Image: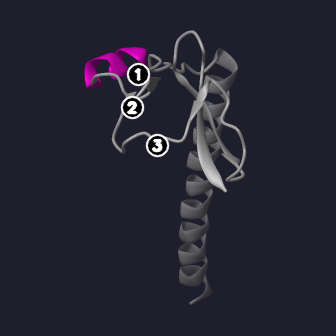
Amino acid sequence: MKQVFYYDQTSKQLTRIGIVSDTADLPANATFVQPQAGLLDPLTWTGTDWVGVSQAEWENNQPAPVSVTPTAEQQLLMQQEQDISQLKQLVMDQETKIATLSKGSAE
């Protein structure tokens, strides 16, 4: 079995990697030449080897970061969760004070 690297006939860019038997015929849009490590996508077949794009071009091809702003409903929910947390803390503090006062009146 051999690893095969398929590329687009027009753009010559790597499209997929496959496995074929040792006796299989190689399609016109494929090669057994493995891309060198460290190349940046997209990889392009030159006819003899693979080339990648520059670091700057690769960075320009990356999608812009998406800024996620919570909806009004999500903001309300977050505020309610915070309020509930504060109320729980207040209840625990009051329980502690009640227990302290109860001990004092029992003596």
Q: How many marks overall?
A: 3
Question: What residue is shown with label 2?
Answer: 49
Residue sitting nearer the eye, 22 or 50: 22
Judge whether 70 appears above or below 93 on screen: above
Residue 59 drawn at (x, y percent): 34, 21
What residue is shown at x 56% (from left), y 90% (from top)? 107
What kind of secondary structure does the magenta stretch mostly adopt? helix
- Given the image, on which type of amino acid does mark 1 rest? Thr
Colour logic: one colour
Q: Report the magenta residues as a range.
A: 55-61
Question: What residue is shown with label 3?
Answer: 34
Contact (Cβ within 8 Å) of mark 3 with mark 1: no
Give the Cα separation between the discs numbered 1 and 2.
6 Å
**Label 1's element?**
loop
Contact (Cβ within 8 Å) of mark 2 with mark 3: no
Is 49 in the magenta? no
Q: Earlier in the sequence, mark 3 or mark 1?
A: 3
Contact (Cβ within 8 Å) of mark 1 with mark 2: yes
- Given the image, on which type of amino acid does mark 2 rest? Asp
